[in-house]
Amino acid sequence: MKLPRSIEEIRSDFPILSVKVHDKPLIYLDNGATTQKPVQVLQVMDELYRTANANVHRGVHYLSDIVSERYEAARETVRAFINAPKREEVIFTAGTTASINAVAFSFGERFVHEGDEIIISGMEHHANIVPWQMLCERKGSKLRIIPFSDQGVLDLEAYRSMFTERTRIVAVTHASNVLGTINPVKEIVTEAHRHDVPVLIDGAQSIQHGIVDVADIGCDFFAFSGHKIYGPNGIGVLYGKEKWLNEIPPYQGGGDMVASVTFEKTTYNELPFKFEAGTTNFTGAIGLGTALDYLTALGREAVAEREQALLAQATGGLSSVSGMRIYGTAPGKVSLVSFLPGNIHPYDAGMILDKMGIAVRTGTHCAQPVMDRYGITGTIRASMAFYNTEEEIDALVKGVRKVTEMFA
Ligand code: PMP
């Protein structure tokens, strides 16, 4: 599959890609942390504030009606994008972290008790560890951790043997933000469902790289962030199966999530509003809808294919640097490479690369247990998006080679 426009044309949609840093053209390879925004998203947000700003679902007046319609249209765009069966199953949140915390709290309140167990994997981002740990502390329950191989592949045998009659939920990342591994989420879900255990998938690093189909995966919950898929910051999505969303209590109370309030008793609104207390980030939601439309117009398969080519080029190039260690060599990966050149501290390397205009992430990537697993304190991570170029990957490899020469 080919992208419908030239890469130069596509890059011109992203104003930030032509800024200079340290007097050098920006080479942005930190897309795993956040992605850049096309003008289409910037314009829709600007236009909303200029011409259609009013509180969503609040009034009968013209502007409120318009913004409510556009907000609900964005929900439909998300629904179609992830192939959720129902619009009511799509909840707008502040991001992946907020979505996971919502499930850990609400599901935990209703279904997790002392002595119960929660399965997560050893390659989770802190966002899919800490909310479950907090739940365990509140309830006296326990975390069970699926181990992974040196390559970065989850040990499914170990996973299968972890289920007990106390297992209440499984929460696993779709793609690791450090190793790039794409986990076999369908298999993970099938196994959990054999035990009647629901599964939450952290989609923060998968949603932007191709086709996420929640109906096909069969997961019970799916979380992602707008800012990682070319949309605005401060908006995200929690998909949940209607059956669960109806059964679990809301995690925040306030306006819009209620059907009726008296001092004696409150009844909750229907889905999805039961989980959208207060004034939501409606501008962000509409911006996210525009970002998803943008990606759909480019062609998600074409985007994935281009990113895979950039990944192969980066992996090949970096591997050729002497003393290079690459963390995460699973057969199926999203377009990111974590690496350490020799014994150079990742911060030192990151700072020198920065001076060359190359933005990469350094450190633990909010996944300290992954670092502990390999006995290291951090890595350098280059994460590619479809708007990156072959020349940029060459510049990265050249830059890293230069860093190793400087420290030789
Ligand atoms: N999970 C994974 C795998 C991530 O990479 C991230 C972001 N680095 C998060 C969760 C948290 O996302 P956010 O900060 O947008 O809530």
Image (cartoon, rainbow, N blue to C red):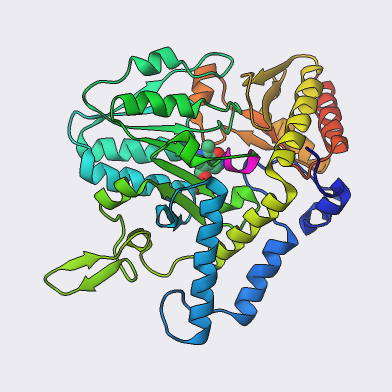
Looking at the rendering, in which quadrant would you find the C terminus?
Answer: top right
Q: Which residues are magenta?
A: 205-209
Examine the structure image and report whether residue 224 is included in the region drawn in magenta: no
Residue at 26% x, 70% y: name it: 259
Query: Residue 122: percent from the left, percent from the top?
Result: 45, 24
Residue 333 higher or lower than 259, as above or below: above
Residue at 59% x, 58% y: name it: 288
In this orientation, does residue 248 appear?
no
Give whichever of 235, 3 is nearer the camera: 3
Q: Quarter of the image holding residue 29?
A: top right
Question: Is 233 on the left-hand or right-hand side of 243?
Answer: right
Give whichever of 201, 122 is nearer the camera: 201
Examine the structure image and report whether residue 207 is included in the region drawn in magenta: yes
Residue at 47% x, 40% y: name it: 215
Query: Residue 105: percent from the left, percent from the top?
Result: 30, 47
Question: Is 226 on the left-hand or right-hand side of 345?
Answer: left
In this orientation, does residue 189 appear?
yes
Query: Residue 153: percent from the left, percent from the top?
Result: 54, 18
Residue 287 higher or lower than 142, as above or below: below
Query: Residue 378: percent from the left, percent from the top?
Result: 59, 28
Q: Main secondary structure of the magenta part?
A: helix
Residue at 46% x, 15% y: name it: 155
Looking at the rendering, in which quadrant would you find the N terminus?
Answer: top right
